[in-house]
Amino acid sequence: MATPPTGRHPNPYRPGFNQTPLVFAGRTGILDAANEALEVAAFDGRTPRPLILVGPRGVGKTVTLGEIAQAAAEQHSWPTVHVEAKRSDLLGELSGKLRAAEQLFRGTTPDGPAHRTRITGAKVQASVLGVGGGIEVARDEGSPEPLATVLRRTMTAAVERDAGLLVTLDELQNATPAELHELGGVLQETVPENWPLVVAVAALPSLREKRGNRLPTYLERAEWHPLDALPGPDARTALTGPADRSGRPMTDEAADLLLAQSGGYPYAIQVAGHFAWRASHGSDAITAAHATAALPRITADLDQLFLSRWEDASGREQEYLTALATAELTVDEPNGGQVAEVLGRPVKAVSYLRDRLIKKGTVYRSGAGGLHFITPGMGAWVRRRDAD
Ligand SMILES: Nc1ncnc2c1ncn2[C@@H]1O[C@H](COP(=O)(O)OP(=O)(O)OP(=O)(O)O)[C@@H](O)[C@H]1O
Ligand SMILES: [Mg+2]
């Protein structure tokens, strides 16, 4: 690595997705629940219910899964198998990584092409078993084994090593109903085995929306944790923590200004911190003047996020989004009927727009049936846009 020039102060904020923050704030309820699940599995010989984190984009689902993985490694020396559901083959990828975990437990992690599992592709984190950081695996070419078989072998190997396994499944709303069904079935069957296995899932709220395809019982009975904006004091910690730690503290006035802009939305907090840090280049504190100078940059960055969602919508869908944003002004959680009212159309005539926007991941429906923008702050952006 090149030596940085002296006096360089790297920006301690992590705007973006899947970026571990320098200071992870709040979420103690979820972390406590995860720690309890890990202890139950590690010490009491019971397989706990899975944890499911659901929430809109950018609230920190993925980084919270990462915190749980860290707890598993630090407190129990357990490795984590992490899989992100994309448009393809969730179960195949999970099997491949479980096999790699089995080899870790057996101490036979291969390092040459002659072995069945090659090192590339997907990551199995194994801080414990002598393999730092993580290894990458490619699925072997042999005939596919059922997930249940692979899981059994992996967990048998784990138990022999007196270890356990954390499985984190991200973006599970992308899984097909068939995949969810098979996954739920396999995991459900493992419960009586009392393996030291903890499953933590993250998904957009649309995971609940698998209408017509009811969620497998295993997931329905899970411990559901809704994630939303960080409450005031945690939002402040997330914003001021990285600056404090990096020796350029943020004044209260600066923090007030930036929090007024970002609310408790974790993604926006990192963006706000990032531009405020940059604006304070050469100073030994981030002041209100720096925060004020950064505000237009922060707005522009967040607007880009809303714009990409907006441009992804058709003309009709944009009308629906505008009506939703308008309805938000008078009702806390407008439902489909109230949005249709703003549009002056019968509900049935516009419900297909709602369904399409839910499918695209622009809008979600809460348990109570209220509609929300998946990206926090988008309603206000749509109203501003409409006013211009
Ligand atoms: N508790 C937290 N404290 C500080 N920063 C956080 C926290 N949670 C999330 N962040 C920051 O917010 C941003 C978004 O986090 P993350 O990618 O985990 O969100 P997500 O919910 O998984 O989003 P998506 O639904 O798009 O996958 C990242 O920059 C991350 O560092
Ligand atoms: Mg994520």
Image (cartoon, rainbow, N blue to C red):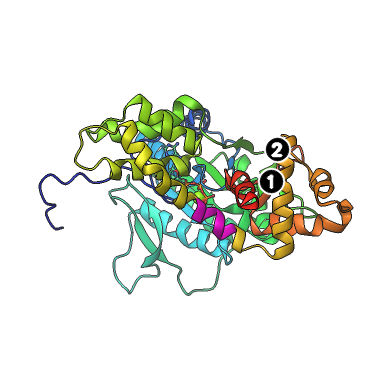
Checking the image for residue 325, the label placed there is 1
How many marks overall? 2
* Number of other residues with Cα within 10 Å of mark 1, as a class: few under 14, some 14 to 19, many 20 or more: many
Q: Is 141 drawn above or below residue 260 in the view shown?
A: below
As drawn, is 362 to the left or to the right of 78? right
Q: Is residue 144 above or below residue 155?
A: below
Residue 120 lies, in percent from the top left, at 36, 67
Say what amino acid the circle numbered 1 marks.
Answer: Ala
Is most of the magenta stretch helix, strand or loop? helix
Asked if residue 78 lies left or right of residue 143, the reply is left
For the residue marked with disc 2, what is the amino acid?
Leu
Q: Nearer the viewer, residue 107 or 342?
A: 342
Image location of residue 11, percent across then percent down: 28, 45
> Does the closest atom of ligand 1 sit within 8 Å of the Cβ of label 1?
no
Q: Nearer the viewer, residue 236 or 365?
A: 236
The disc placed on residue 252 is: none
Residue 197 locus on image (x, y percent):
51, 42
Which region is colored magenta? 303-309
Tell me the CA gap for discs 2 and 1. Answer: 7 Å
Q: Residue at x 41, y 42 (%)?
A: 295
- Camera sees residue 215: no
2 and 1 marks in contact (CB < 8 Å): yes
Q: Quadrant of residue 335?
A: top right
Q: Is residue 268 left or right of residue 329?
A: left
Label 2, residues with CA under 10 Å away: few <14, some 14-19, many ≥20? few
> Residue 329: which disc?
2
Q: Horizontally, is 112 left or right of 360 in the view?
A: left
Determine the secondary structure under disc 2: helix
Q: Is residue 168 magenta?
A: no
Q: Is residue 313 visible?
A: yes
